[in-house]
Image (cartoon, grey):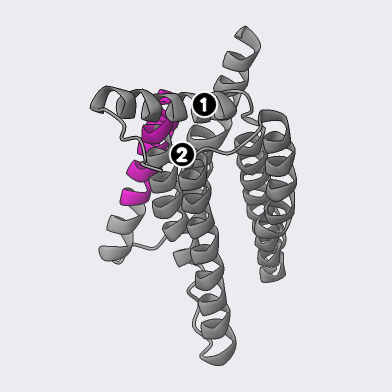
Amino acid sequence: MEEKKLTERESIELITSMISRTKERYIGDGNILLMWGYLVVIVTITVWVLQATTLRREWLWLWFLIPLVGGVATPLMSRKRHLKSGVKTYSDNVTSRLWAIVGVSEVILTIICLCLAQLLKVNAWSSMLVYTLLVVPFAELTQGLIVREKCLVYGGLTGLAIGAIFICSVAGQMVLYAHWFLPLFIIAFIAMMIVPGHILNYKAKKR
C-alpha cells in the first residue's frame, strides 16, 4: 500500500497542531514548575539560615532533599497529567527527554562532587549551583521556544543571565559568598519556575 505524502501545508498544519497540543498540556498544569520552584527556594533558604546561625556544615546535606523530593514527585505528577490529557505528542517526547538529560547530568555531577570530596578532600559543591543555572535555564528556554510560551522563554533567559554572572565570577576567581550568591540563585528559580508556574495556571483558569 502506497504511503500518502504530506504536502508542505499539511506538514506545517501537523507541526502546528502538535505544538498547540503540547502547549495546552503545559498551560493546563504549571504545578510541576511550582513544585520544583518552591522546593528549591525553600531548601536554599533553609540551608542558608541554618548554616549561617549554627556554622555547622552538616546542614549542607539538606541539598539532597531537592533531587530526592523532586525526583519522586515529578514522575507521579507527570503520570497524572498525561492520564488526563491523553496521548503524548512528538513535542511532548522532545521536552520530556530534554528534562531527562538535565536530571541525568545533575546526578552525574553530584557523583563526581561526592567522589572529589570523599577521595581527594576537594570541595567542588559550588559547581552544582553554577551548573544548575546553566543547564536548567537552557532546558526551560528550549521548552519555551518549542511550545511558544513567552513566560518560559523569559524565565529561561533570566536564569541564563544569572548563570552567566556565576560563570564569570568563577573564571575571575571571585569567592562565591552566600550573602550574594544564594539570593541570586533564589531569584533565578523564582523567575524560572515559580512565576511561569503561576502564569500557566492562571491561563488555564481563564480557559
Q: Secondary structure at mark 1?
A: helix
Give left or right: position of 42 versus 158: right
Residue 30, horizontal then vertical, whole percent: 61, 29
Residue 151, horizontal then vertical, whole percent: 44, 26
Q: Quadrant of residue 68?
A: bottom right
Q: Is residue 175 magenta?
A: no
Q: Is 170 placed above or below 116 here?
A: above
Q: Quadrant of residue 82?
A: top right
**Residue occupying image coordinates x 68% and y 63%:** 64
Residue 204, horizontal then vertical, whole percent: 62, 16
Q: Which residues are magenta?
A: 145-164
For label 2, count other residues whose C-alpha is less than 10 Å away and answer few (under 14), some (14-19) or many (20+).
Answer: some
Which quadrant would the C terminus be assigned to in this image?
Answer: top right
Point out the residue furthest to the bottom here: 119
Q: Do callouts 2 and 1 mark residues in contact (Cβ within 8 Å)?
A: yes
Q: Is residue 83 visible?
A: yes
> Which amino acid is tagged 2?
Ser
Q: Is residue 153 magenta?
A: yes
Q: Is 204 placed above or below 90 here?
A: above
Assign the magenta stretch its main secondary structure: helix
> Which amino acid is tagged 1?
Arg
Q: Is residue 185 visible?
A: no
Which quadrant would the N terminus be assigned to in this image?
Answer: top left
Kindly identify which residue carries mark 2. Answer: 91
Q: Is 106 placed above or below 66 here?
A: below
